[in-house]
Image: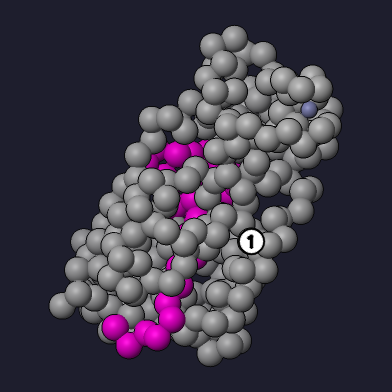
Amino acid sequence: MPDQKKLAQAAQVFKQARYPVALTGAGVSTPSGIPDFRSPGKGLWKKADPFSVASIWGFIEQPQSFYDWLKPLAGLMKTARPNPAHHALAQLEALGKLNAIITQNIDGLHQSAGSQRVLEVHGHLRQATCIRCYHMVDAQPLFDKFIRDGAVPHCEICGGVMKPNAVLFGEMMPVGIMYEADQESKKCDVMLIAGSSLEVAPAADLPLVAKKNGAQLIIVNKSSTPLDGVAAVIIRDDVAVALPKLVELVQK
Ligand code: ZN
């Protein structure tokens, strides 16, 4: 059971918030069956060294290894559904109590749950781009074909390799999205951090930007984070349990 006192505290902070934003990580999608894709020692990392497989250099040298590694995730893109944590955040936005979600997730589940303003700092898997001519297409048909025949998807125009629009290691974050995420972090007076261990940049940096500009941090995560010491409220619980309860209390 989530800590009622902490939840009540968090709800109070939210009720008084003028411009709350959320920052979400892999922990928000694990209840939907999406494996943790970036945290070392977890999820997809157990099977391969992501620094080589899921880096832009690895991708260019061995696209087959990348696609083999991505296969479980590519398959899940079609079947995974938003969980109560995603729905709770969408509800907060609908209530006028959330101005944006900054997410490290590439699965698009916030949008599936109905969230409108989602800043995907690590890109997404909805589309893929040719690394030679930058031709862009919907990714799902490519994934479907890859799951059927196991062959690396190539560009229909020039024959180059197609890369999903997710940010790989060694690649730049999307500049426009990062700018917006930074602006939101400066503007917010409350940052709700959910399902992120805050170890990987930029998730590790944005809460500090928010804090420096006077925001209160609320952290909902199963394990401790490096920013626990500066958070106003820490809820050490499953996001799919705690966030719906928080939304309930915010409406009271
Ligand atoms: Zn091409």
Magenta span includes 106: no
Tell me the kind of residue under disc 1: Ile
Identify the residue at image location x=50%, y=81%.
188
In-front residue for pair 51/16: 16
Q: Picture coordinates of residue 200 (x, y %)? A: 64, 58
Q: Give how far across and how far down residue 57 sits, in percent.
A: 83, 37
The C terminus sits in image quarter:
bottom left
Q: Is 62 rendered above or below residue 120?
A: above
Q: Residue at x 59, y 23 (%)?
A: 142
Residue 132, quarter of the rendered image: top right
Tell me the residue at 77%/36% (across/down).
Answer: 134
Q: Nearer the viewer, residue 49 or 251?
A: 251
Range of the magenta residues? 15-43
Q: Is residue 37 magenta?
A: yes
Color encoding of the figure: one colour
In the rendered image, the residue lying farthest to the top is 149
- Badge 1 marks a residue whose secondary structure is helix
Is the CB atom of the residue marked by disc 1 within 8 angstroms of ligand 1's nearest atom?
no
Residue 127 lies left or right of residue 61; in this view the side is left
Quarter of the image for residue 173 reads bottom right
Residue 78 x/y as whole percent: 43, 30
Q: Residue furthest front?
A: 157
Q: Quadrant of ligand 1?
A: top right
Name the residue tied to disc 1.
177
Tell me if residue 217 can be seen.
no
In the rendered image, the quadrant that contains the N terminus is: bottom left
In the depicted structure, whether residue 193 falls above or below residue 8: above
**Label 1 crowd (10 A; few <14 / some 14-19 / many >=20):** some
Q: Is residue 241 left or right of residue 252?
A: right
Name the residue rendered at 61%, 49% in the picture. 123
- Looking at the image, residue 60 sits to the left or right of residue 180; the answer is right
